[in-house]
Image (cartoon, helix red, strand yellow):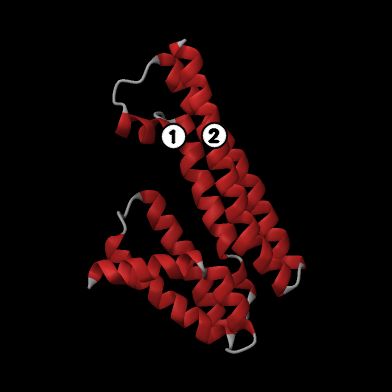
Amino acid sequence: MSRRFNLLAGAITVVYPLALWWGHGHFEPRVLAILLLLVVLARLHALRVSQAARWWIGGTLLLFGFAVWANVMLPLKLYPVLVNIALLGVFAYSLVFPPSVVERLARLREPDLPAAAIDYTRRVTQIWCGFFAANGTIALVTALWSSPGVWWVYNGLIAYVLMGILFASEYCVRLYVRSQQNA
């Protein structure tokens, strides 16, 4: 049951922009915020509550709480901004206090990384920091100054496509770099 609920909550998180866009004309922002708050609260038990997770949870509760109190949509539209800020914070922190996030992930597959691979993972972490900064900025602009449709298209579609392109591009570059090192 818990696994199914976590999958459902994860799916709701992914389709968050679509749910907001669709719900915008059907429900008050307060109702949407309460539903989303329930999803966040239900997922708390599954989260590893690190310092970064506490900030994300606090920010999420603040945004959704304000949406309930004021019955406005803007705090709900700012959630993707919060997610990008949180991810930027985690990735940037790992650059200041190594190992980087990407190095930690790489070490799950290959515990003994060579120095060149560590430099590479650091560069990839920097690129992801740039992505989260740019994506968060665009999410903010669409939340503040665009129509609900434009906000949804960017945050519910384009941002995911861009993330996938960055991930796939990095994977191709990684394969190329490895082939050059092995040649």
**Place of residue 7 in the rendered image (x, y in percent of width and height, measured from the top left):** 34, 66
Label 1: how many Cα within 10 Å (few below 14, some 14–19, many 20+):
many
**Image quarter (top left, top right, bottom left or bottom right) of the N terminus:** bottom left
List the residue tagged with mark 1: 102
Q: Residue at x 66, y 46 (%)?
A: 134
Q: Could one spot residue 161 in this view of the protein?
A: yes
Residue 85 in the image: above or below residue 44: above
**Place of residue 153 in the rendered image (x, y in percent of width and height, measured from the top left):** 67, 65
Q: Residue at x 62, y 55 (%)?
A: 159
**Place of residue 88 in the rendered image (x, y in percent of width and height, measured from the top left):** 54, 45
Picture quadrant where residue 97 is located: top left
Along the viewing direction, whichever of 99 and 117 lies nearer the viewer: 117
Cα gap from disc 2 to disc 1, whole angstroms:
11 Å
Element marked by disc 1: helix
List the residue tagged with mark 2: 170
Label 2: how many Cα within 10 Å (few below 14, some 14–19, many 20+):
some
Image check: 81 left or right of 14? right
**Place of residue 141 in the rendered image (x, y in percent of width and height, measured from the top left):** 73, 60
Image check: 15 left or right of 105? right
Q: Residue at x 40, y 65 (%)?
A: 10
Along the viewing direction, whichever of 94 and 181 lies nearer the viewer: 181
Picture quadrant where residue 39 is located: bottom left
**Circle 2: residue type:** Glu
Q: Residue at x 31, y 27 (%)?
A: 110
Along the viewing direction, whichever of 1 and 65 lies nearer the viewer: 1
**Circle 1: residue type:** Val
